Amino acid sequence: MALKSYEELIKIDVSQYCEDRDGFTYLNWAKCIELLRKNGATEVYWEPIPDPQTGSSLRKTDIEFKDKNGNTNRCYETRIKVVIDDKEYEMQTPVMNGANPVKDNSMSQQRVWNSMCRAFVKCVAIHTGLGFNLWLKEEYNKLEAKIPGTGENLASEAKKKTLKTQCTAHGIDLAAWVCRNEKTMDTLTETECAKMLNAIKKKYGDD
């Protein structure tokens, strides 16, 4: 039996097999392989593509930069080959700490491994349709978080204080969240602040 078509695989609800981690929904790589096999694939695997210069699974840029605290950082990525029956694909993806970039002082083998696993699941979604809706949801949430509030009043100190309190209570890096949306606490609008509070409420159920 051949692997089912893209149109068929994209309709499979994989959410029941997923787990939430660091604010994202993940499909385990092993479960992904199992689902492909259950839907017609006979051979599925992936393997690292080492950096040709170092032989390591971890790839990095030569350019370093520092954050506001003086910690050095650079861009880290992994690259893998994915084999599904008679087809081969390659996927390169950043090494992340949840939604944040990994810094030199927090790099670990586990994060390199997680990056490759995530690359595999994403590659499968792109080329076969299995789990693709997970990525649609993730990208949609990114767009929703960046809805501009042009011409609106700046967020009040009271609302910003509430936002800071909620983020502290749930271990959310507010500075990174605001920065990712190309804002600062001083330029945050009432609408943007309200949307962030609503996002926290949706995730954690706070009133």
Image (tube, rainbow, N blue to C red):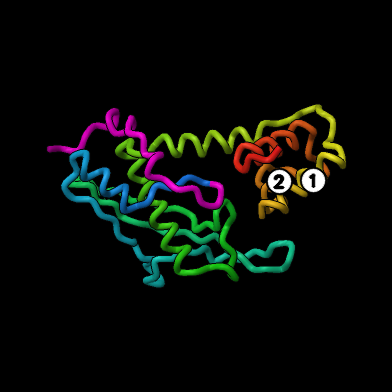
- Give the crowd class for mark 2: few <14, some 14-19, many >=20 residues within 10 Å: some
Looking at the rendered structure, the number of numbered marks drawn on it comes to 2
- Residue 168 belongs to magenta span: no
Asked if residue 173 lies left or right of residue 100, the reply is right
Tell me which residue sits at (40%, 57%) in the image: 116
2 or 1: tag closer to the N-terminus:
2
- Which residue in the protein does label 1 denote? 185
Type of the residue with mark 2:
Val
Q: Please, what secondary structure does the residue beneath circle 2 have? A: helix
Left or right for 104, reference 36:
right
Residue 66, x across and y down, in percent = 68, 65
Q: Is residue 3 magenta?
A: yes
- Name the residue located 51 percent from the left edge and 39 percent from the top edge: 138
Residue at label 2? 178
- Residue bounds of the magenta highlight: 1-23
In the foreground, 39 or 59: 39
Q: Amino acid at mark 1?
A: Met
- Circles 2 and 1 in contact, beta carbons < 8 Å: yes
Give the left or right position of residue 79, taking residue 87 as reference.
right
Q: Residue at x 51, y 61 (%)?
A: 76
Residue 188 x/y as whole percent: 78, 39
